[in-house]
Image (cartoon, rainbow, N blue to C red):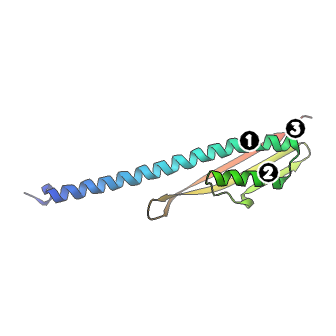
Amino acid sequence: MGLANSPGAKRIVLLLWVLVAFFYFYLSYDYVRVTMSDRQFGEYLQHVVQIAATEGRTAKDVRDLLLVKADQLSLPVRREQIVVRNAGESLDVAVHYNVDIEIPLIQHEVYVKTFEHDVKYQGPR
């Protein structure tokens, strides 16, 4: 009877497979959660650009609204990552940020996901 057939070795192999599965599902969950939050943020960005352009809101107002939403969605968006350009009847907003996908418990970065949003509003001529 070899060591590989002992009950202790089988338990260790099972434990290792359970740990691998746990890390895989956690990373998948974290990736899906961040992607869904970004989708909500992108939809909100579209809405804010439409409203801000028609109401004549300032660049500061737009940034503040986007920062509040990013905070609600736990997205790491900073003020300097939001670029707002007003030019008469048009409004152009660009938001570019990165999210770290980390290993649970260790908090070590495994993957960096980059998100880029460019939304424009062109008023009637």
Left or right, 121 with respect to 29, comes to: right
Cβ atoms at labels 3 and 2 below 8 Å apart: no
59 or 96, which lies in front? 59
Q: Which mark is residue 123?
A: 3
* Mark-to-mark CA distance, 3 and 2: 17 Å
* 9 to 116, vertically: above or below: below
* 120 to 78, vertically: above or below: above
The disc, 2 or 1, on the residue closer to the chain's N-terminal end is 1
Residue that label 2 marks? 62
Residue 113 is situated, as x and y percent measured from the top left of the image, at 57, 53
Quarter containing the N terminus: bottom left
Left or right, 123 with respect to 15, comes to: right
Residue that label 1 marks? 46
Seen at 70% across and 60% down, the residue is 78
Cβ atoms at labels 2 and 1 below 8 Å apart: no
Q: Identify the amino acid type marked 2.
A: Val
Image quadrant of residue 124?
A: top right
Badge 3 crowding class, 10 Å Cα cut-off, few under 14, some 14 to 19, many 20 or more, is: few
Residue 108 is situated, as x and y percent measured from the top left of the image, at 48, 64
Secondary structure found at label 2: helix
28 or 68, which lies in front? 68
